[in-house]
Structures are given as structure tokens and as C-alpha cells.
């Protein structure tokens, strides 16, 4: 086994990997951006190295900076987590080129399966059919229209090197194609570092079922069980569960065998997930994620396996210590993603900011995988996942009720979260009866009545008052390496993270509904303007998009709230804006 592992990631997945390493007696190395200097994963690791920069491109996607940290720390292996470089062939080869183990599949397997286009070809060659789609990158709008004329609208435009719904757009007619392609390419580039996109037929009422596979270097490949990830919004998963409800066992066995076939066809090693769409008794290969999935804890709870531990053991050359026949799956597990988004009125606007209070739930069968604690800041520059709440029950209904109880116990203050939406979904009779699909949340669940901020409005921060100094541990960087030292600091500053605001806080900007009549167009959160769609003199309608704002790796349409003429445009593409900033004036 390894003596020291570097985790090339941040947030809850970095924390998750660090904890398993600690249980195995492995020293851990964290890396961090300027904004993550005091992040939880940095505090938990045995040592940490600065990458510099704020955005993902400047830090967690900076290959040279990470390679330098690997060399300086003396780490023997690198765990990439998910997102960032986890499915990047060039990064995997750069790591192994330094004589360091990449905790994941061989670069060749990532090359085949990390690219969603070549993965379709490989699956089809192995006899596993996929959803009708292209096997070449799409660069021309005419290709999208021609594909739709053959297979019908709507069509899914997807990031070839992506996952998790990032860089995916669904278009319903030719007029939407150009903007959808541009948006998908922008998101793919920002989140995965590659802009390539491809096409698939968008099924009308499918369920998203995925199979967890695990393969070692000794020729053993197993499927550990399926997860139902059908509760989605904006093509991003909200709730996942295992086993899939109302799912025939003969289909389960066939899907598991197909997943192993796909894994073996590309010489796969380590943990991976083969995703399928299931509709009316048939399943279709969708893609293979050559990494650990966000939703892996539900598989852990029903199988009793620690997947991160087995990732490390396989990467160290150990054989799997069990066979397909040895696997047992017990009970039912459900996972809910708690994201820093404001679901008020069903809008799900990103909600970066400081978490003033986080109180986790407790009780039997409850697990919280969090990347933050009270006082930590959720940045606009990274994914907005705050935590994953996972519960286990002897059956699905028991697990569902336990999750509802645990969600109601969970307290998050300072930022809005998706907890109110999660409660509404779990409490819906369709979910209880397993009558859901990937389109169910957006088509049939009414989230427009959700209360502002889910009843958890950020508390006011009191004005500064003179306070005595106290002894506190603070961090310092020496030649890029993070150290902890003791200093006498003001008591107020002692409890605040670096860069935290200590004066009176202004009220949170109001996110209004289209049609309230305001001619001042403002942005509801901090972010970057990626596109301006109007000019001075243009006539706009209520609800018409004025500009597109990227915040927390999501694109958000900023719309006019009244009909009129644009008298002023205050931003350009590339500008950074803060919550409440005016971007245009309509009269």
C-alpha cells in the first residue's frame, strides 16, 4: 500500500478520500487555490501545497502546478476525485510519467471511455447498443438539424469529455441550435478543459440507471449493483438511490453483465460506472464514467464496501478479495445532493457565500459527506455542491422517510440550499411510487411555490466592536507549502475565514419574477458575463434574456422584467459582476 497520496481535487470528494486514507494509515497531501487556503480538505490533510490562482483553470486544472506539488511532496500516488482532471488522459499520463501511480484506470481506457464518442463505438463493438446518436464530434448547426430530421426532436447536445450534466443542452427546434451549441461548448471548456460536443436522441420518458463496476490488474471485473439517478434538473442529478426501484431482476443481471463487457472491452482497471437509459423494458448504453461517481456512497451502504479503499488497493496492485457470487446487497440507500442554490420559485439560482452555520443531522443510518463546515465560504468559481446526505434503511420506504427526517434536521445558514426542493421531491407521491424519469422533476413537479431561501435567510453580521486579542492557530505559506503557526489575533478575526467580511452586511439582493415591472436589470449573484444579447436601442419583451451569467460552473439567463427599449448596457462579455450589480437599463 502507498505511504503518501496526493488528492488532486477539492471539496467533499477530497475530504472523502482523505478520510479513507487516514483509516488506512496513508499520509495525505492536499492542493489548493488562493480561495481554498483555509478549506476543509486543506485543514484535514497532513500537508498542503498552493497551486495559485482563483479559477479552476488557474488552479485545479493547472497541470504544471499539480505536478510540482507531487514532486515536492514525494507522493507515491495521485487520487483525482471526480471532475477536474479525473477523466483527462493527458493528466493521467503526466502523473505516470513522473513514476507516480494514478488512482484510476489506465490512460488508454480513459482515452476510449472518457471521450463519450469513442465510448459509444467501443460499446457497440462489444455488442452493447447505445441511444441513437453521432459517433463524430459536431461542429456545424446543419448536422444537428439533419440528425433531428432523421430521429426527431428533441435532440441532446452533450460534452464529449464531460459528465454530470455539464455541457449538456436539449434543443426542441432549429431556432435553438446555435445558442445551445455555443453554451454547451462554453460549459464543456470551462468545466472539463475540452469544448468538443456530440449528439444523441433525447428519449421521452427514460430512467437513468447506472452500474458500478470494479476491476483489478489480475483480470477480475465485477458489477457491484445499480443506482437509479433519474431525479434530475438541468440534466444534473438531484437524488440517487440503490437498488433501483421497480426494476426487474432479469434486466438488472443483463445490465450488470453488459457493464462488465464494456469495462473489459476497453481494458478497464479500478472503479468505474457504466451508465444506461432504461425505458419500457429496454436499456441503452449511455456512457462510461472512468472515475469515482458523486453518488458512490449509496453503493457503499448497500454492499458494505469502501470504494475509495478498493480504488487504492487496486491501484497498489492488489487483487479483488471477492467474486461476483460473494457480493451481497442489503437494504436500500438514498443520496441527496445539497447544493448552494436558491430554489425560490423553482429558479435554482447559484448562491455562493459564507456558510455561517452548518448543523449536520444524526441518528441511525445517516451519513453526511460534506466539503464545508460553519464559517467556510462557497466560491462562485467552483461547483456548488456543499454536501451529500446519504441514508440507509431496510427497504425503500424506510429509507425515504429517514431521508425526510434527516433533511429536516439539517441546518445550513448563510447560503441558500436545495434542501426545500429535495424535501418536495422526496415527499411527492410519484417518487414514493417510483413513477419518475429523467424528465419528471421538470415536467411534473411544481417547485414554483418554494419559499424564499427555504426559510433560511442569512443572518445579519454585526458591526465591528473592539475585542481583546486571543491566541489562535493560523496558516502561512513558505515556498508554496502550507504551515500552521500560532499568533495573537483579534477575537473577532479568530473565528472568521481569510477574506471574510467583518462589517455590516447588506441585504441579499431580491431575485424577482419576470413581469414585476423593474427596468433595472441586475444579477442575483457574483459571476462572469459570458454573453450580452442586447444593445442600446433594442426593444425587449418581458422575460427576454439580456445577458448570460456564469456562476459556479452554471450558465444563468438574466432576463428583462419589463417591456421597453434598452437605454443602457453596463457590461461586456468577460466582465466580473457582483450580486445586485446593474447590467442594463430598460425604459
Image (spheres, rainbow, N blue to C red):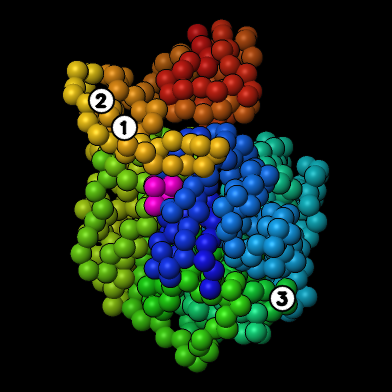
The residue lying at 22 percent from left, 60 percent from top is 362
Q: Is residue 304 above or below residue 325?
A: above
Q: In the image shown, does 378 or 404 lie closer to the viewer?
A: 378
The image quarter in which residue 266 lies:
bottom right
The residue singled out by tag 2 in the image is: 490
Give percent across and percent down for residue 568: 56, 9
- Do labels 1 and 3 touch, CB within 8 Å? no
Tell me which segment is drawn in magenta: 40-44
The residue lying at 46 percent from left, 86 percent from top is 327
The image quarter in which residue 549 lies:
top right
The residue lying at 45 percent from left, 38 percent from top is 37
The residue singled out by tag 3 in the image is: 267
CA neighbours of label 1 inside 10 A, class few (<14), some (14 to 19), many (20+): some
Q: In the image shown, does 200 or 186 lie closer to the viewer?
A: 186
What separation in Å lies between label 1 and label 3 (alpha carbons)?
A: 53 Å
The residue singled out by tag 1 in the image is: 487
Q: In the image shown, does 438 or 111 lie closer to the viewer?
A: 111
Compare marks 2 and 3 and give the one earlier in the sequence. Answer: 3
Amino acid at each position: 500500500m502507498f505511504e503518501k497520496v496526493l488528492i488532486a481535487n477539492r471539496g467533499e470528494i477530497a475530504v472523502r478520500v482523505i478520510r479513507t486514507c487516514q483509516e488506512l494509515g496513508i499520509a495525505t497531501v492536499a492542493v489548493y487555490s488562493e480561495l481554498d487556503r483555509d478549506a476543509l480538505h486543506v485543514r484535514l490533510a497532513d500537508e498542503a501545497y498552493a497551486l495559485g490562482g482563483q479559477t479552476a483553470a488557474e488552479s485545479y486544472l493547472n497541470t504544471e502546478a499539480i505536478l510540482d506539488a507531487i514532486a515536492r511532496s514525494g507522493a507515491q500516488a495521485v487520487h483525482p476525485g471526480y471532475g477536474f482532471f479525473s477523466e483527462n488522459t493527458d493528466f493521467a499520463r503526466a502523473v505516470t510519467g513522473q513514476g507516480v501511480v494514478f488512482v484510476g484506470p489506465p490512460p488508454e481506457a480513459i482515452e476510449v471511455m472518457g471521450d463519450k464518442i469513442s465510448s459509444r463505438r467501443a460499446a457497440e463493438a462489444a455488442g452493447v447498443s447505445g441511444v441513437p446518436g453521432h459517433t463524430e464530434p459536431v461542429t456545424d448547426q446543419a448536422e444537428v438539424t439533419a440528425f433531428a430530421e432523421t430521429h426527431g426532436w428533441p435532440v441532446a447536445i452533450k460534452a464529449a469529455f464531460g459528465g454530470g450534466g455539464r455541457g449538456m443542452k436539449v434543443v426542441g427546434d432549429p431556432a435553438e441550435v446555435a445558442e445551445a451549441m455555443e453554451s454547451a461548448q462554453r460549459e464543456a471548456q470551462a468545466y472539463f478543459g475540452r469544448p468538443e460536443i456530440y449528439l444523441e436522441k433525447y428519449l421521452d420518458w427514460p430512467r437513468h440507471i447506472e452500474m458500478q463496476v470494479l476491476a483489478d490488474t489480475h483480470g477480475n471485473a465485477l458489477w457491484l449493483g445499480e443506482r437509479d439517478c433519474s431525479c434530475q434538473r438541468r440534466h444534473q442529478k438531484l437524488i440517487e438511490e440503490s437498488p433501483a426501484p421497480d426494476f426487474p431482476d432479469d434486466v438488472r443481471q443483463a445490465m450488470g453483465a453488459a457493464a462488465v463487457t464494456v469495462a473489459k472491452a476497453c481494458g478497464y482497471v479500478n472503479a468505474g460506472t457504466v451508465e444506461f437509459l432504461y425505458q419500457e423494458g429496454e436499456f441503452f448504453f449511455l456512457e462510461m464514467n472512468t472515475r469515482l461517481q458523486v453518488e458512490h456512497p449509496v453503493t457503499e451502504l448497500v454492499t458494505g464496501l469502501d470504494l475509495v479503499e478498493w480504488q487504492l488497493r487496486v491501484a497498489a496492485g492488489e487483487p479483488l478479495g471477492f467474486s461476483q457470487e460473494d457480493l451481497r446487497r442489503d437494504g436500500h440507500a438514498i443520496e441527496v445532493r445539497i447544493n448552494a442554490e436558491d430554489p425560490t420559485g423553482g429558479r435554482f439560482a447559484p448562491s455562493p457565500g459564507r456558510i455561517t452555520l452548518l448543523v449536520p443531522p444524526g441518528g441511525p443510518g445517516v451519513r453526511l459527506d460534506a466539503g464545508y463546515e460553519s464559517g467556510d465560504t462557497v466560491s462562485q468559481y467552483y461547483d456548488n455542491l456543499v454536501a451529500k446526505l446519504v441514508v440507509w434503511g431496510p427497504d425503500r420506504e424506510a429509507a425515504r422517510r429517514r431521508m425526510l427526517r434527516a433533511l429536516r434536521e439539517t441546518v445550513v445558514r448563510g447560503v441558500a440550499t436545495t434542501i426545500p426542493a429535495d424535501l418536495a421531491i422526496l415527499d411527492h407521491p410519484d417518487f414514493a411510487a417510483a413513477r419518475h424519469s429523467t424528465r419528471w422533476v421538470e415536467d411534473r413537479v411544481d417547485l414554483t411555490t418554494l419559499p424564499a431561501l427555504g426559510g433560511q435567510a442569512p443572518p445579519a453580521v454585526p458591526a465591528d466592536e473592539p475585542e481583546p486579542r486571543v491566541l489562535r492557530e493560523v496558516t502561512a505559506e513558505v515556498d508554496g507549502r502550507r504551515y500552521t503557526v500560532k499568533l495573537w489575533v483579534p477575537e473577532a478575526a479568530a473565528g472568521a475565514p481569510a477574506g471574510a467580511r467583518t462589517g455590516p452586511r447588506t441585504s441579499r439582493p431580491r431575485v424577482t419574477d419576470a413581469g414585476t415591472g423593474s427596468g433595472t436589470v441586475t444579477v442575483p449573484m457574483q459571476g462572469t458575463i459570458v454573453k450580452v444579447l442586447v444593445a442600446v436601442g433594442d426593444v425587449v419583451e418581458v422575460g427576454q434574456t439580456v445577458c448570460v451569467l456564469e456562476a459556479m460552473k452554471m450558465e444563468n439567463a438574466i432576463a428583462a422584467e419589463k417591456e421597453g427599449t434598452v437605454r443602457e448596457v453596463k457590461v461586456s462579455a468577460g466582465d466580473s459582476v457582483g450580486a445586485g450589480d446593474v447590467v442594463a437599463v430598460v425604459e
